[in-house]
Image (cartoon, helix red, strand yellow):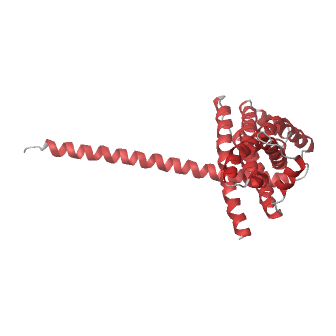
């Protein structure tokens, strides 16, 4: 009986390809399973934070310490960021508006851009980089050194003491930082307008706030609270659930920045759609 070697080779190739395909499908299944587990854990973490926030014995001392750390310690960075945003918007918009003979619309355009979109989003992204990474690294290092387990042994609720206070402080202080950045952005816009001209301070700010209505201001304020909450939750979650190795601290800080920045952009998109529906 003659054996067909070509047929055997073809069958071997087919079997190898099926094995590779099965391995890829298994890897994708494991990835999807791990992703769904991570999403479920994240939502359970949010539920735990909400439950502990409205429980008794709120840690007010730690909350005020985190407000000082998140708010006051971030002022120098937000000051520079806000002023530069307004200055850059003015410098780039002035030649365009000059070509259309609409330089008088510059203050109102810059103020609306800052209040509605640029101020909240850019400031939130800066806070995600500074505050979110700080939370992830701090809580991650506490996880690695087993300080969180030591708090549990000492009858201290680490979720209430470490997480709730940080999330509440971020939810309160980041909107204030955004308002501060908006004000400095408009002031930076006045400085930029005076680079090639002489604009009266009172006249500039009168023209800047003339087109701003309450319906323009309200969505920006509301979404800024969501920005603060998601930055605090993501930063705390990544640090609180970090691994045991020292390398996990860097992973927690990095993933906190990436994920919180992504959530900020998604929340901004949803808020823009809702605001457009309300206006229309």
Residue sitting at 78 percent across and 61 percent down? 216
Residue sitting at 92 percent across and 45 percent down? 60
Residue 28: % across, % down: 47, 48
Q: Is residue 28 visible?
A: yes
Quarter of the rendering occupied by the N terminus? top left
Which residue, as the protein is rendered here, is positioned at the far left? Answer: 1
> Is residue 244 placed above or below 163 in the rendered structure?
above
148 or 58: nearer the viewer: 58
> Is residue 54 placed above or below 245 in the rendered structure?
below
Q: Is residue 169 visible?
A: no
> Is residue 146 placed above or below 214 in the rendered structure?
above
Residue 266: % across, % down: 65, 54
Residue sitting at 83 percent across and 55 percent down? 207
Residue 198: % across, % down: 83, 43
On the rendered structure, is 26 left or right of 85? left
Residue 271: % across, % down: 71, 59
Which residue, as the protein is rendered here, is positioned at the far bottom? Answer: 280
209 or 80: nearer the viewer: 209
231 or 142: nearer the viewer: 231
Quarter of the rendering occupied by the C terminus? bottom right
Q: Where is residue 75, by image quadrant?
A: top right
Marker count (numbered): 0
251 or 153: nearer the viewer: 251
On the rendered structure, is 123 left or right of 261? right
């Amino acid at each position: 009986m003659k054996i067909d070697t070509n047929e055997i080779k073809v069958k071997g190739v087919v079997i190898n390809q099926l094995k590779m395909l099965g391995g890829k499908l298994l890897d994708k299944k494991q990835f999807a399973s791990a992703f769904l587990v991570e999403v479920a854990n994240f939502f359970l973490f949010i539920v735990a934070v909400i439950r502990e926030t409205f429980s008794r014995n709120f840690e007010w001392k730690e909350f005020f310490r985190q407000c000082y750390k998140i708010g006051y310690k971030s002022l120098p960075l937000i000051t520079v960021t806000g002023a530069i945003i307004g200055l850059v918007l003015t410098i780039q918009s002035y030649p365009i508006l000059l070509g259309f003979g609409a330089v008088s619309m510059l203050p109102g355009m810059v103020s609306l851009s800052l209040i509605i979109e640029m101020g909240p989003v850019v400031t939130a992204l800066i806070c995600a980089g500074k505050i979110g990474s700080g939370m992830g690294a701090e809580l991650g290092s506490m996880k690695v050194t087993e300080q969180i387990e030591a708090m549990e042994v000492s009858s201290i609720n680490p979720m209430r003491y470490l997480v709730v206070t940080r999330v509440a402080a971020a939810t309160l202080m980041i909107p204030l930082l955004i308002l501060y950045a908006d004000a400095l952005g408009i002031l930076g816009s006045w400085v930029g307008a005076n680079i090639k001209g002489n604009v009266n301070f009172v006249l500039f700010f009168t023209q800047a706030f003339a087109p701003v209505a309450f319906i323009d201001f309200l969505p920006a304020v509301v979404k800024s609270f969501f920005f603060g909450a998601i930055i605090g939750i993501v930063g705390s979650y990544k640090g609180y659930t970090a691994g045991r190795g020292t390398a996990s601290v860097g992973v927690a800080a990095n993933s906190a920045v990436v994920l919180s920045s992504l959530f900020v952009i998604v929340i901004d998109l949803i808020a823009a759609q809702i605001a457009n529906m309300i206006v229309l």
